Image (tube, rainbow, N blue to C red):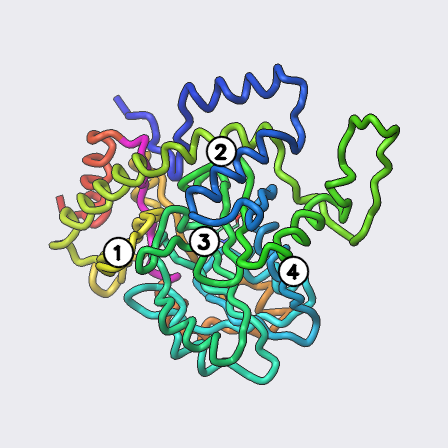
Amino acid sequence: MSQAPLVFGAPDIQADDIAQVLAVLQSGWLGTGPRVAAFEAQFAAFKGVDPRQVVAVNSGTAALHLSLLAAGISPGDEVITSPLTFCATVNVILHVGATPVLADVDADTMNLSATSVAARITPRTRAVLPVHFAGRPCEMDALLALTRARNLVVVEDCAHAIEARWREQPTGTLGDFGCFSFYATKNVTTGEGGMVIARDVAHAQRMRRLSLHGVDRDAWKRFSADGYPHYDVTDCGFKFNMMDLQAAIGQHQLARVQANSLRRQAIWQQYQAAFAGLPLTCPAQPDAHTVHARHLYTLLVDEARCGVSRDVFLARMLGQGIGVGVHYRAIPEHSYYQQSLGWQPADTPVATAIGRQTVSLPLGPGMGDADVQRVMAGVRQALEMT
Ligand SMILES: *Cc1c(COP(=O)(O)O)cnc(C)c1O
């Protein structure tokens, strides 16, 4: 009898989340309201920042986009980022009219290499956008030394790194802006959603206004003793606001993040032990002075060593009903960037090599021991090493 497929990145939805969604539906207020405010306050407490620094939005992409706008990044400016990321990281730079510049990643950590960033800095560089890949915090000492010396804005893409820390300091509070995603596969989900932390409260206020059409939300009060409250549009904004319906899920998801993190850690270490003797490259162990969010567990499948190509390996895993992912084919592999920016895979050789060999295995708090065993056996089977 064949087993039900093991879904990659399955969200951890519990009775609590469902009850909260029903409560919001029954409350008659679905849009941006008290639940969003409460979720922002909870997230601020979780990150140890002032609630006025935090703005909930409807995606991680929106968080990145608003950060670049609030930082004043505009046409003519260059923003250096990672080639080993989701396309949104690069697209937002283009959306504000700036020029994305790819540095390469470090082969072991898979994070932006400070040496490579230093080599791409020009007089037009205004910002650096590091991605804490797979939940492993970037080498922030080296990156911040570079950016501080040149007064560059730092926007952290924390989509994989909600609960990560660098030298005790929470990710998203190391740079000028920290951007989080609550997409369905992320460690905390609201279905779709995101959050942004700004070091500067004035930046957060601007992002809040831009997230809701550029309307001043202080004037956005529906009931007032002083008559009808006309609102004023003070900025050309966007439709990036989070709904109470989403925030209600997020509140309960965030409350479970630490417990879930322990389960993620345990599975991650079981995988490390199980695959150590196989002809695969396992992820580097986390640095001692960090908390790794264990968002992804990625193996490198080198055809010369394994006798099987990455794509055949992926197909064999899927054939066993085990969901897998690819994080990521390097950005210059995609036709849009080749055609519009002239980028080539050889421009970022380390990220390109990783992108051609990488496989992400299922990793989540909802996985039982039998699921973990099934993945471990599936990997051996895919390598024909049973
Ligand atoms: C998920 C993700 C994003 C985008 O987040 P959305 O909420 O899907 O918009 C950006 N960067 C990285 C690295 C991601 O994994």
Quadrant assignment, res 324: top left
Residue 159 inside the magenta-drawn segment: no
| Residue highlighted by disc 3 | 158
Quadrant assignment, res 356: bottom left
Give the percent coordinates (x, y) of residue 133. 39, 57
Where disc 4 sits, the SS reads helix
- Name which residue type carries label 2: Gly
| Residue highlighted by disc 1 | 308
Quarter of the picture containing the N terminus is: top left
- Name which residue type carries label 1: Val
Tell me the number on the disc at residue 70.
4
Between disc 4 and disc 3, the foreground one is 4
Q: CA distance from mark 4 to mark 2?
A: 25 Å
Between disc 1 and disc 4, the foreground one is 4
| Residue highlighted by disc 2 | 250
Q: CA distance from mark 2 to mark 3?
A: 16 Å
Height in image: 62 above or below 252? below
Q: Tell which residue pokes out farthest to the front in this image.
A: 225
Of the image marks 1 and 2, the number of the one nearer the N terminus: 2
Q: CA distance from mark 4 to mark 3?
A: 18 Å
Range of residues picked out in magenta: 355-367
Give the percent coordinates (x, y) of residue 85. 46, 59
Of the image marks 3 and 1, the number of the one nearer the N terminus: 3
